[in-house]
């Protein structure tokens, strides 16, 4: 079990992470104001409910907000459609060719997908796409990592609450979450008797029920258990990853130490800056344009106000009463020509052109020009497919990071959870001893678009070989037709159960060859019989002719 000294050491780690992140938070605060409102409130202490400032982050133009939402929604629909968006395959292709093995893996993929789909993953995934599109970094947790029988649940972690140290592969090793909880919430979470005296007194007296106490949640590695067999049920303190709650101020442990089989935190980045563990996104790239656009809109708003309700000019002695510009107002002047409106010389055309240029630049940064398909409303299916594939290529590098940082880990973790809980079919005989490596293949619109070009190239190449074979017969031996068919089926995400394995193909080819040989022998025998019959008839005719001559 974790000791007090270890909790103090974890608290020092958290303090160092919190201090080091202050240099990154300044850009997040501006991104929240202009791109993703109400997603973080980075610099609010929120010690009470009244400290939450709902009207603090105002802006004057929604171009970046709408562009980020459009990109986020498009990525969500393209990567995670409302159909099974991944398949499982053996990395060893010889195992994939075994029908029993591939059928088991295909069934396991369906069960894993159903477990994910029946959870709140899709709902929380939408929040994840918003964070990585707006801030360039997002965190999600799978709360079922602790107990096999616990319902699978995912949760988005606000960026401002998240602190982590990465390992050599860029994955979270130590993860900290700073929570601001009321005494009532702490009693509900841990129980009154499991809380230190300081919190019990705050709960008993309740002089300020909205007061929030800083609590640190930490996930840390247990090096002594890193080689534990996670395919079996383990007690929480014997699992490779531990977790603990403690107060930031007093370093007092709250509740009992827990554990996870797999690290339950997914740290997802749009792009990663060399030398930094934090990600950056489209908003970072065009933040200057976004701020300039908002400033232009503010200046234009003020100029419009002046044009609609201009200021008035008068001489020093021209006004004899208070200026009254209200309905039926009366103003006394010395001379009618001594009071006149001030006509500003604002150039709204230049302002409009500048605003349009800035908006176009922001939309390009968020790929909105590729997503809206606005140039051709009567676009054909082929044109739409080409435009869609172009958008996928532009987001291809980001898709790769999303897969590695997030989706691969989600599928792997859920697979292990379902396997430990006995919700997968038993492995076929002979497979369990192998302990095979399993690969994840994505079949969403974005992943399919990336593979469609290769599939089309393969088909065109095979067609070209078939045409050349007419003039050069040797060409027909160049194409491995069976391998070509299997690879195209994989690229098109054709279910394994409708593709015959290699043994089945060999069996059918052998049967066809035997049938062809039998038909050939039958045809040959029939031809020989007809030939013998013809010879016999000829001989009989010859004998008859000779008898007539005698």
Image: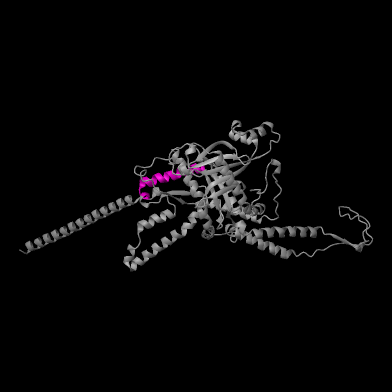
| Quadrant in the rendering for residue 8 | top right
Q: Is residue 530 left or right of residue 181?
A: left
The quarter in which the C terminus is drawn is: bottom left
Which residue is farthest front?
5
| Quadrant in the rendering for residue 155 | top right
Q: Please name the colour scheme applied to the rendered image.
A: one colour
| Magenta region includes residue 113 | yes
Residue 236 in the image: state x and y as whole percent.
49, 37
Which residue is farthest left?
550
Residue positioned 49% across, 56% down in the render: 449
Number of numbered discs visible in the structure rendering: 0
Residue 329 in the image: state x and y as whole percent.
89, 53
The stretch in magenta equals 95-117
| 477 in relation to 254, above or below | below
Magenta stretch, main secondary structure, is helix
Q: Is residue 82 left or right of residue 484?
A: right
For the question of whether residue 298 can be seen, the reply is yes
Nearer the observer, 136 or 506: 136
For the question of whether residue 500 can be seen, the reply is no
Residue 444 in the image: state x and y as whole percent.
50, 52
| 237 in relation to 172, above or below | above
Nearer the observer, 264 or 190: 190
Nearer the observer, 211 or 120: 211
Q: Is residue 509 left or right of residue 341?
A: left
| Magenta region includes residue 58 | no
């Amino acid at each position: 079990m974790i000791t007090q000294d270890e909790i103090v050491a974890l608290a020092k780690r958290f303090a160092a992470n919190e201090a080091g992140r202050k240099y990154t938070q300044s850009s997040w605060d501006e991104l929240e104001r202009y791109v993703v409102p109400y997603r973080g409130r980075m610099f609010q202490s929120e010690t009470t409910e009244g400290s939450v400032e709902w009207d603090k982050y105002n802006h004057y133009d929604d171009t970046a907000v709408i562009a980020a939402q459009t990109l986020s929604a498009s990525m969500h629909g393209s990567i995670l459609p409302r159909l099974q968006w991944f398949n499982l395959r053996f990395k060893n292709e010889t195992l994939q060719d075994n029908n029993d093995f591939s059928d088991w893996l295909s069934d396991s993929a369906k069960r894993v997908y159903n477990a994910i789909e029946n959870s709140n993953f899709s709902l929380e995934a939408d929040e994840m796409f918003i964070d990585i599109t707006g801030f360039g970094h997002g965190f999600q947790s799978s709360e079922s990592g602790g107990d096999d029988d616990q319902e699978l649940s995912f949760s988005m972690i606000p960026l401002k609450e998240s602190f982590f140290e990465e390992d050599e592969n860029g994955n979270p090793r130590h993860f900290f979450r700073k929570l601001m909880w009321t005494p009532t919430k702490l009693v509900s979470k841990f129980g009154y008797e499991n809380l230190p005296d300081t919190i019990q007194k705050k709960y008993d007296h309740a002089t300020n029920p909205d007061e929030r106490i800083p609590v640190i949640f930490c996930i840390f590695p247990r090096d002594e258990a890193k080689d534990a067999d996670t395919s079996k049920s383990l007690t929480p303190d014997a699992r490779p990853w531990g977790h603990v709650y403690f107060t930031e101020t007093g370093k007092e442990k709250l509740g009992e130490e827990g554990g996870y089989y797999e690290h339950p935190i997914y740290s997802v980045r749009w792009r990663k800056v060399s030398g930094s563990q934090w990600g950056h996104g489209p908003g970072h790239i065009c933040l200057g344009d976004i701020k300039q656009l908002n400033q232009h809109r503010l200046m234009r708003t003020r100029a419009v106000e002046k044009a609609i309700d201009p200021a008035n000019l008068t001489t020093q002695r021209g006004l004899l009463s208070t200026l009254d510009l209200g309905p039926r107002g009366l103003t006394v002047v010395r001379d009618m020509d001594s009071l006149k409106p001030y006509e500003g010389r604002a150039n709204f055309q230049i302002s409009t052109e500048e605003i349009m240029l800035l908006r176009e630049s922001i939309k390009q940064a968020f790929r909105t020009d590729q997503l809206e398909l606005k140039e051709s409303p009567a676009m054909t299916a082929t044109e739409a497919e080409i435009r869609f594939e172009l958008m996928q290529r532009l987001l291809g590098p980001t898709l790769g990071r999303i897969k590695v940082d997030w989706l691969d880990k989600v599928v792997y973790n859920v697979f292990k959870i379902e396997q430990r809980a006995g919700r997968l079919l038993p492995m076929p005989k002979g497979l369990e001893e192998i302990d095979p490596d399993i690969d994840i293949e994505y079949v969403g619109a974005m992943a399919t678009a990336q593979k469609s070009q290769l599939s089309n190239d393969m088909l065109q190449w095979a067609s070209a070989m078939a045409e050349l074979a007419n003039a050069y017969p040797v060409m027909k031996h160049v194409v491995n037709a069976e391998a070509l068919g299997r690879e195209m089926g994989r690229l098109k995400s054709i279910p394994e159960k409708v593709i015959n394995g290699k043994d089945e193909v060999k069996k059918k080819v052998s049967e066809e060859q035997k049938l062809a040989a039998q038909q050939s022998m039958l045809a040959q025998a029939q031809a020989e019989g007809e030939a013998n019959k013809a010879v016999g008839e000829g001989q009989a005719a010859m004998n008859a002719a000779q008898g007539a001559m005698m």
